[in-house]
Amino acid sequence: MSSDATTPDASEDPVGYFLDDITYHGKSDRTRSFYERVLRDFESFLSEGGRPIPVAEASHRDCMAYVHGLRGEKSESTVATYASYLHRFYAYMTQVGTFDSNPMTLVMEEMDESINTDPTRREIGIPAMRAFVAGVTHPLERAVVVTLLKTGMRVGELCNLDVRDLNLADAGPRPDIPVRASLDGRADSLYVSAAPARASVVNGEERTASNKRKRDTTVPVDDELAAVLRRWLAIRPDTQSPAAPLFVSTSGDWGQRLTPDMVHHVVETHARRHGWYRDGGGAEENVTPHYFRHFFTTHLRDRTGDRGVVKYLRGDVAQDVIDTYTHEWGDRVRDVYTANIYSLL
């Protein structure tokens, strides 16, 4: 990337260079601001003391000292967030050849495993979340919220779901669209593909969000989620899209596929009414769609004690987990899920 009046030079301002690159790659303004906050804080840390240290020259000991300093003033989950952002920054700058190595690699390996969990915002118990869901009465909004809470999928993954990706044993009113072949014989399941990427055309429609799964995932649908989805499908507006999106707008963009911004707006509106969101609130305070992913991970993992199944359902799986679980779908993943998934309704 060449430097000009608006593009930071990689050698003079590697943080600015990185921030521009993740913007070009489709990261939201929200994500960019989170990265900027962490990386500029790290820069300030390196500038303290007798000799300022350029970011490109920071050693693993510098990074470790920074992370260690966070532990006394921030929660474990916030330390996890900061460390993961630093790690991704150095990994990217190394990959593009700007930095020689990633000093965070060793730091991440030496951190306690509990630090490597999803960032925790606030701790919400199941009864409190059940009360929150009770306040979400619109069929579309309830379907969106319950799907996120029951599956742990990302916002972009939810937005990219098509009608064909849902197979309900009791289908109820729904468009006459065959389920995808991967769901044959797997009733009460959602298929989350790893394929969709922002601006790519999938199933005949250009997408506005990217899926970030390592592998395609088939996620069980329990009775509560099935009922919520049937209620939504009964009133779902017709759409002109050949892809037949599962979730479409019922407001100004009538019949158009939901976008991540629309989902964020829905969740923020209800969280604000519930006292779980305020302007200026940080990641530890405000409840957002990503918090629902953390809620799913925490509560299902605590109930099952099975990290492998939870990682599979989240789409964060290594090949050995896939080999262990996918060929035992009926005996393992579905059984563990249905026996332990929490009730929200």
Image (tube, grey):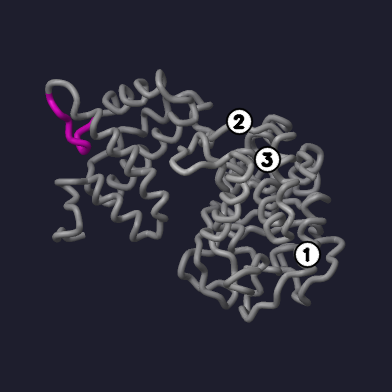
- In x, y percent, where is residue 300? 69, 36
Can you say whether 230 is above or below 68 in the image? below
Real-space Cα separation, disc 1 to disc 2, in angstroms: 38 Å
- Mark 1 lies on a secondary structure that is loop
Location of residue 245 (image quadrant): bottom right
**Which disc is residue 88 wearing?**
none
Residue 123: numbered disc: 2
Give, as a single range, the part of the protein colored magenta.
51-58
Write down the quadrant of residue 131 in the picture.
top right
Could you tell which of marks 3 and 2 lies nearer the N-terminus? 2
Asked whether the beta carbons under mark 3 and mark 1 sit within 8 Å of each other, the answer is: no
Of 295 and 104, the residue lying toward us? 295
On the image, the x and y values in percent for residue 213 come to 55, 53
Give the residue pinned by disc 1: 184
Kind of residue at disc 2: Glu
Q: Residues within 10 Å of mark 3 (few under 14, many from 20)?
A: many
Give the secondary structure at mark 2.
loop
Sequence order check, earlier mark of 3 and 1: 1
How far from the left and from the top, in percent, is residue 67? 36, 26
Viewer-side label of 1, 2: 2
Which kind of residue does numbered mark 3 sit on? Val
Q: Main secondary structure of the magenta part?
A: loop
How many neighbours does mark 1 have within 10 angstroms: few (below 14), some (14-19), or many (20 or more)?
Answer: few
Which residue is depicted at the point 80% across and 43% down?
338
Query: Disc 3 designates what residue?
Result: 309
Residue type indicated by callout 1: Asp
Q: Which callout, 3 or 2, points to the residue nearer the camera?
A: 2
Residue 280 is situated, as x and y percent measured from the top left of the image, at: 43, 41
| Residue furthest out toward the top | 72
Query: Residue visible at 70% across and 69% down?
Result: 164
Side of 201 where 193 appears, left or right: right
